[in-house]
């Protein structure tokens, strides 16, 4: 993984010192809250319902054992003993104080971490495929370019006061595991004519109140021109994005107002006018970064293992774990293991300090001291020898981390919602917990199969409800928490925004509604091979509507709700 | 009270003077964009001795016509309006503007170093805590940066330096240890 050189160290230390000075000027009154707000947001510090929240970047999701231990230390010393992994490969501490924050940033700097631009109207933490560098379906490792983008976007003076926040995601694999089409800019490494790799550039995706799937801006961009091209895109957005209306300020609105062709023309004109050679990443820097992402020295291990096979045959839980939570590694004899932070009843994405320490130890013992965080709020151990799987699993069981539901209905994404967030309409965490408990029979979850269920506490969509196969959105209905359900969203290559199925439900009725949706699917699918999403794409919302809102059945919501006419309240 | 804080020539990465204004530009007439453009067209050459003041929403096509002005003043209605930064880079890097580039309006201490890196070299400041801090010699910034822009703090990783720019930009060498 990438290691800081003296220059990077100097940068993060200097940044932390700068923020310490800003905090002291805020406390002395030299800075008003209005003047201070953008500065603290650019250092990841939010003001939430109960106080400050600090969002720490885990750039493109890669984290080492020593970094996990530092995060555990911060959780214990400055928070209430836990942290929350977010949908953008960050970790949030929900109970920090303003005056402690500079010390926390110093502590992070010691382990090559920071909170630079995890918030604010600037280029946010760049996200990527959590399986980068190890996935069997990879064309090229995206982390080299993700790291280049991390550096380029960090305190880039031109792009710190954009019209609105700006999110970039990059993938180098055949399957999109980074939801790049729901980002302001999505980058996909592709092979061009002649076999050289470059980028397909997508623009204008996003969730929020106006969800859009990103559109193709440029089918092939030579690798070496990435930075100059992005400068051109950012400049067009910075100059022409709307600044008069918070809700219309994202680049997706500009792209749709101009049309993708006119937007592309303006970007091209800007790109032609700037000095590309001066702005592109020098080859020497690419060569410096690249070796950081070489595979660790993986000893030859057997590609099949009799003991593992026998354990699978006699231990259904272990078998389920191997089936759901492991994936093929580039190197035979190794597996990629997902640790799902989704034990039914748990807060999705939360990890206690003890669990972070345990993960640090486990990663050190079994995965070359490296882990990844995923946008579905799980942890990935990228280099686990097949022969070590049973030992690893037993260790995870002992630490309460062996939930074998990766990719299933209980592997829920949920934002913090009304329990923490001052923008929320409704709670997300208890709804996630209730659904996870309802479906906690592993055989039943296996029968349902692959399913992405996402929950957001408000239309800002931090819980990615738009891209959930089943999406749940908290809405405010005459002062009560209600939940609107969408169906058919997809985060991947076939990205799609979900469709609202009908009137919203009260919190206590949501598990029943999900039950009705699942029953509809299980009863009517072609075969066990037809996934929920495939089924939905074949039949649309009709059968679900009939079940949810039609003539009374055991699963139908109460009549008063059926009669409500305003969708979403 | 307002203060004109200057960083000297565009080559200077560090503030050099804190005074009542540039000798040449402090008392120079400054016209709104439309009037300045009218002068530029009257053939008298008067626009070459007259400054121009523009807003952050000035059209890129108009920016292209301003290179002859000895002084361009960009009005910043709100410190969060990031367009001023793009305007500065377009003037300096795309149009090769070498005159004084001043920012006025909601100019605050924490943005000065960023505005400098974008290409501004003078700052008209009305915010008292900012004036006090500058008087104390306190100009917060980050000692190092990842973008090899022509106006920058001294520290950049050697492999991030652009060979092309170093070879062509004569003002860049002295600032790079
Ligand atoms: S979706 Fe809404 S409630 Fe949830 S974290 Fe985002 S802003 Fe808060």
Image (cartoon, coloured by chain):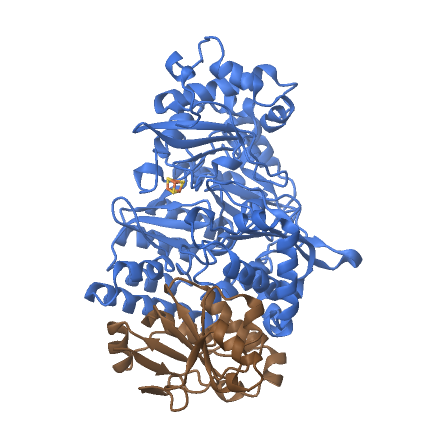
Q: Please tell me whether residue A24 is drawn above or below residue A318 in the rendered image.
A: below
Q: Percent x, y for residue A475?
A: 38, 31
Q: Percent x, y for residue A331?
A: 65, 49
* Residue furthest bottom in the image: B23
Q: Please tell me whether residue B55 is drawn above or below residue A260 in the rendered image.
A: below
Residue at 24% over, 67% down:
A25
In the picture provided, is A362 more to the left or to the right than B127?
right
Q: Percent x, y for residue A245?
A: 42, 49
* Residue furthest left in the image: A28
Q: Percent x, y for residue A517?
A: 51, 20
Assign the N terminus of chain B to one quadrant of the image: bottom left
Instruction: State the image quarter where residue A113 is shown.
Output: bottom left
Task: Determine the colour of chain B.
Answer: brown
Q: Please tell me whether residue A535 is drawn above or below residue A85 in the rendered image.
A: above
**Depth check: A479 or A384 in front?**
A479
Residue at 46% over, 49% down:
A89
- Total number of numbered discs in the rendering: 0
In the picture provided, is A349 more to the left or to the right than B93?
left
Q: Please tell me whether residue B135 is drawn above or below residue A293 in the rendered image.
A: below
The answer to whether residue A325 of the structure is visible from this angle is yes
Q: Quadrant of ligand 1?
A: top left
The answer to whether residue B146 of the structure is visible from this angle is no
**Depth check: A540 or A302 in front?**
A540
Chain assigned blue: A
**Depth check: A47 or A373 in front?**
A47
* Residue furthest right in the image: A194
Residue at 39% over, 17% down:
A561
**Depth check: B175 or A337 in front?**
B175
């Amino acid at each position: 993984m990438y290691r800081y050189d003296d220059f990077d160290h100097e940068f993060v230390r200097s940044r932390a010192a700068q923020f310490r000075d800003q905090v002291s000027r805020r406390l002395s009154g030299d800075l008003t809250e209005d003047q201070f707000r953008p500065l603290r947001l650019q250092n990841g510090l939010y003001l939430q319902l109960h106080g400050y929240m600090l969002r720490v970047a885990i750039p493109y999701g890669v984290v080492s054992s020593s970094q996990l231990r530092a995060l555990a230390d911060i959780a214990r010393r400055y928070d209430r003993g836990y942290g929350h992994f977010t949908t953008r490969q960050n970790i949030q501490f929900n109970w920090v104080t303003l005056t402690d924050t500079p010390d926390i940033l110093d502590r992070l700097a010691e382990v090559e971490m920071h909170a630079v631009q995890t918030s604010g109207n600037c280029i946010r933490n760049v996200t990527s495929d959590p399986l980068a560098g190890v996935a069997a379906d990879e064309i090229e490792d995206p982390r080299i370019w993700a790291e280049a983008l991390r550096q380029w976007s960090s305190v880039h003076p031109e792009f710190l006061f954009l019209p609105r926040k700006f999110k970039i995601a990059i993938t180098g694999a055949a399957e999109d595991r980074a939801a790049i089409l729901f980002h302001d800019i999505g980058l996909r490494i592709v092979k061009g004519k002649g076999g050289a790799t470059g980028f397909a550039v997508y623009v204008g995706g996003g969730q929020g109140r106006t969800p859009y799937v990103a559109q193709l801006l440029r089918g092939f961009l030579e690798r070496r021109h990435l930075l100059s091209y992005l400068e051109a895109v950012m400049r067009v957005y910075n100059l022409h994005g709307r600044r008069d209306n918070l809700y219309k300020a994202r680049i997706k609105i500009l792209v749709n107002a101009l049309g993708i062709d006119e937007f592309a023309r303006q970007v091209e004109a800007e790109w032609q006018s700037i000095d590309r050679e001066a702005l592109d990443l020098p080859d020497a820097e690419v060569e410096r970064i690249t070796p950081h992402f070489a595979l660790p020295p993986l000893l030859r291990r057997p590609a099949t293992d009799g003991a593992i096979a026998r354990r699978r045959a006699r231990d259904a839980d272990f078998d389920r774990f191997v089936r759901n939570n492991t994936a093929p590694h580039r190197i035979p004899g190794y597996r990629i293991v997902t640790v799902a932070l989704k034990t039914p009843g748990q807060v999705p994405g939360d990890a206690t300090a003890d669990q972070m320490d345990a993960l640090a130890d486990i990663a050190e013992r079994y995965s070359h001291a490296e882990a990844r965080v995923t946008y579905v709020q799980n942890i990935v151990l990228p280099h686990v020898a097949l022969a070590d799987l049973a030992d690893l699993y037993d260790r995870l069981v002992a630490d309460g981390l062996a939930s074998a539901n990766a990719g299933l209905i209980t592997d829920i994404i949920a934002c913090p919602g009304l329990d923490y967030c001052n923008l929320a309409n409704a709670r997300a965490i208890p709804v996630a917990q209730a659904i996870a408990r309802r479906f906690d029979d592993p055989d039943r979850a296996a029968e349902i199969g692959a399913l992405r269920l996402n929950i957001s506490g408000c239309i800002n969509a931090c819980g990615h409800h738009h891209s959930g196969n089943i999406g749940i959105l908290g809405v405010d209905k005459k002062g009560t928490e209600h939940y609107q359900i969408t169906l058919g969203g997809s985060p991947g290559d076939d990205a799609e925004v979900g469709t609202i199925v009908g009137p919203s439900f009260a919190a206590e009725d949501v598990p029943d509604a999900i039950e009705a949706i699942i029953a509809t699917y299980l009863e009517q699918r072609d075969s066990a091979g037809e996934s929920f999403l495939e089924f939905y794409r074949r039949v649309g919302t009709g059968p679900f509507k009939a079940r949810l809102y039609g003539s009374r059945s055991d699963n139908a919501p109460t009549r008063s709700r059926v009669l409500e006419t305003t969708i979403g309240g | 009270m307002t203060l004109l804080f200057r960083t000297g020539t565009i080559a200077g990465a560090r503030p050099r003077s804190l005074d009542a204004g540039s000798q040449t530009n402090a008392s120079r007439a400054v016209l709104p964009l439309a009037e300045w453009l009218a002068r530029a067209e009257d053939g008298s050459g008067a626009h070459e001795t007259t400054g121009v003041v523009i807003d952050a929403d000035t059209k890129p096509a108009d920016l292209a016509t301003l290179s002859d002005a000895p002084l361009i003043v960009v009005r910043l209605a709100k410190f969060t309006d990031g367009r001023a930064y793009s305007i500065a880079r377009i003037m300096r890097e795309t149009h090769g503007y070498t005159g004084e580039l001043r920012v006025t309006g909601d100019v605050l201490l924490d943005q000065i170093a960023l505005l400098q890196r974008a290409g501004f070299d003078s700052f008209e400041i009305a915010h008292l805590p900012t004036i006090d801090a500058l008087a104390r010699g306190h100009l917060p910034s980050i000692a190092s940066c990842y973008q090899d822009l022509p106006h920058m703090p001294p520290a950049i990783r050697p492999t991030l330096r652009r060979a092309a720019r170093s070879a062509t930009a004569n003002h860049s060498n002295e600032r790079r240890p």
